[in-house]
Amino acid sequence: MPHRFLNPRNLFPNPAHHAATLRLPAGTAPAPLTLTDALGRAVRRYPVPVGPETALDLRGLPAGLYLLRGAGPARRLAVE
């Protein structure tokens, strides 16, 4: 099944280095967030966002492409 991706302006900066911000559109159902690597392995888990924006700590992650799932459609994130 293909992934639905959200507008990339809602996850920034992208590419990111040590942190990124996720901005959720109004009406998004709250859910925990999971960051997966290119092989689909969960590399980070984040709690349910409590507001319209949440900070994601990316420190210690190797450079690469990731997929953020939860609280709406999946989002692509590049970490440099």
Image (cartoon, rainbow, N blue to C red):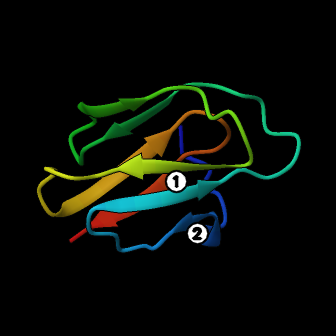
Instruction: Assign a secondary structure to mark 1.
Output: strand
Q: Residue at x 57, y 55 (%)?
A: 22
Tell me whether circle 2 and circle 1 mark residues in contact (CB < 8 Å): yes
Counting from the top left corner in percent of width and height, residue 53 is at 66, 51
Q: Is residue 47 left or right of residue 36?
A: right
Q: Residue at the spot x=88%, y=40% of the render?
A: 27
Element class at badge 2: helix
- Could you tell whether 52 is left or right of 69 in the image? right
Q: What's the residue type where badge 1 is placed?
A: Arg
Q: Quadrant of the C terminus?
A: bottom left
Give the labeled residue for mark 2: 8
For mark 1, what is the residue? 75
Find residue 78 and report its horizontal and vertical position in percent: 32, 66
How busy is the neighbourhood of tag 1: few (under 14 within 10 Å), some, or many (20 plus)?
many
As measured in the structure, the alpha-carbon distance from the residue carrying label 2 to the one carrying label 1 is: 7 Å
Quadrant in the picture for residue 9: bottom right
Task: Give the image location of residue 33, x and y in percent.
Answer: 50, 32
Q: Left or right: 16 with respect to 80?
A: right
Indicate whether 46 appears above or below 62. above
Residue 70, located in which quarter of the rendered image?
Answer: top right
Pick the front one: 36 or 2: 36
Question: Which x, y percent locates residue 48?
Answer: 59, 27
Q: Is residue 51 above or below residue 16?
A: above
